Amino acid sequence: MKLSYVRSDAVYKKIMEAPVEKKNDIYRYELMMPFKGKWDCYQIPMKATTPNGYDIIMASNMLGFISPTKVDQSQKANIESLSSDRLWASCEQSIRRSLECFLNNGIELPVSEYLFTVLLANAESPYISLNEGYCGDGGIPGYIMAWLIPNEFTLTRLPVALAHEVNHNVRFQFIKWRNSITLGEMMVSEGLAENFATHLYGEDKAGP
């Protein structure tokens, strides 16, 4: 099993210091491009073919990621919150521990390489507010990410959220993702993932 990550803090620092006309492309090609396999599954292009067309920048805004054009000096403290080696080691440990739960129980996983990152969330997004400041996505096998408004609460919930997303990641290695997934199937998927996360971290860590 190979587990690697994209250090978003380094990219965000670069975006923060870049002129506004360069910010989108740094975000697009240095932070999102490593996850192109994931975005291809969702049919999200890296760059729109027409001005202001649908692409990874627009999709990121819809998901509640902070817009790269808003990554300026006002985000310095948030970027610093993601700059701890201990934080990234904790995230890696959570993902590795979660995957090993399946491997140690004799479940042979089709995917052997995993890539993850942690992103900054848009504090003005209703989606982020509903989720108490942190979210995740692990629905495409091999790719795991979380995004959050960094604070004491969300940073302590990050390993739990990643465990939840690992459960999705494993589930969809055996069930092919499709856009026509039903509400009932989503309820089962979310229930299994949250049960898994609280099994590892405790019922008091259940997400919203």
Image (cartoon, rainbow, N blue to C red):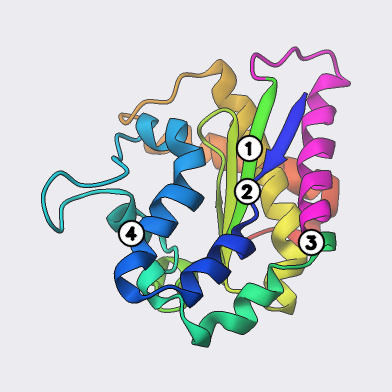
First reached walking from the N terminus: tag 2 or tag 4: 2
Work out how far the residue at label 1 is from the one at label 2, CA to CA, in angstroms: 7 Å
Work out how far the residue at label 4 is from the one at label 3, CA to CA, in angstroms: 26 Å
Name the mark on residue 62: 4
First reached walking from the N terminus: tag 1 or tag 2: 2
Circle 4: element type: helix
Q: Amino acid at mark 1?
A: Leu
Q: Are marks 1 and 3 in contact (CB under 8 Å)?
A: no
Image quarter (top left, top right, bottom left or bottom right) of the N terminus: top right
Residue matched to label 2: 6
Residue matched to label 3: 87
Disc nearest the viewer among 4 and 1: 1
Name the mark on residue 160: none
Magenta part of the protein: which range?
Answer: 87-111
Secondary structure predominantly adopted by residues drawn in magenta: helix
The tally of labels here is 4
Nearest the eye: 196 or 44 = 44
Nearest the eye: 13 or 97 = 13
Disc nearest the viewer among 2 and 4: 2
Work out how far the residue at label 3 is from the one at label 2, CA to CA, in angstroms: 13 Å
